[in-house]
Amino acid sequence: MPSSTLRDQLDADGFVVIRNILTLEQVLSLRVAAERTTALARSGGWPHVRTVGKQFPPWDAAEAAEKGIWGVQGLNDPALPDHAAFLRVYFGDEVLGPAAELMACSADDDLVMELHNLLVRPDRDFALRWHRDDIPAEATPEEESARLDELHREGYWHAQWNLALCDGDESLVVVPGSHRRARTAAERAADPFEPSMPGQLVVRLGAGDTVFYDNNILHRGGYDAGRERLTLHGSAGRAGPGAGRLRARNVLQHGVGAYVGRCDFSVLDERYRARAEAMRARLVQLGRESGDVGYSLTG
């Protein structure tokens, strides 16, 4: 496997920050699209949302008016008015170039289309508890270690990122290095919403900055109702034997299968359109091979 400074940092810490991954012009254009999309979702015009008080899917759109939202799902769905702007950034080299480097694969030949969502400011303060995205908190130390070893045995099979469109994004809090080990006794005993976990680090992003992170690093999220947030939350996978049923569950539980076949890639230039079609085909194949996948976590 070729050497990579980005991958070395991801291996060591469980996350890597890339500053100014987008130009100011790109950020401003995407921010306008994100603002319109958020307003549409808050008004009830887009039902695919994450509701305040519930951390993991499925979410009930009927609760959005009362509880508020902290996220918008399905940015690549052709039914979303601004989907074209989100498709361009999702399939572009700015994001998929580093993602492919982290997975040691080709952006054009190996990637699998996955998730593209938007994380937004809630109407009241809201916190996500400490978690790993695909390992339940109830796992024993032995189960946790075995699953982490399995996930890292053949390199990374997916890349996950937060791309901030506003300055002052400090929502993601991680414990560096925890992606390679089971939780310590102190971490297991801590309150699920512990504000000061030993060794924690607040990831600070400005507009146009991106953090790529191992989604099984021990992490939490903090949502401040007084601070604007518009952050693209996406992931892409690597095709191959390691992209099996568990990875399919991590992706398909978010409803991407409902619209992937309808995605309109005509807004992309020829090169990126070919990339997008190939990535979609690999996702469809993954879903077909995996069947009914259920949900990774509850709550």
Image (spheres, helix red, strand yellow):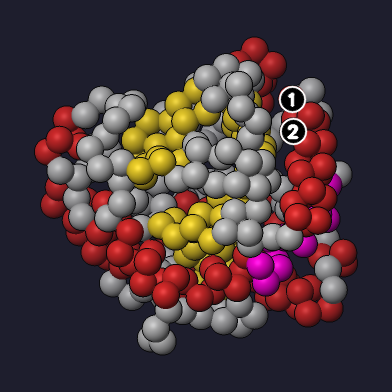
Q: Is residue 192 above or below residue 274?
A: above
Q: Position of residue 223 (x, y in %)?
A: 52, 28
Q: Is residue 25 left or right of residue 167?
A: right
Inter-mark Cα distance, 1 to 2:
6 Å
Quadrant for the N terminus, please: bottom left
**Picture quadrant of residue 168:** top right
Residue visible at 87% across and 67% down? 266
Q: Residues within 10 Å of mark 2 (few under 14, many from 20)?
A: many
Query: What amino acid is labelled 1 in the image?
Result: Arg
Residue at image mark 2: 38
Q: Is residue 20 left or right of residue 3?
A: right
Q: Nearer the viewer, residue 205 or 287?
A: 205
**Helix or strand or loop: what does disc 2 sit on?**
helix
Residue at image mark 1: 42
Q: Position of residue 72 (x, y in %)?
A: 67, 37
Residue visible at 54% across and 25% down? 224
Contact check, label 1 and label 2, Cβ < 8 Å: yes
Using the rendered image of the protein, determine whether residue 137 is visible from the camera's viewpoint: yes
Magenta span: 82-94
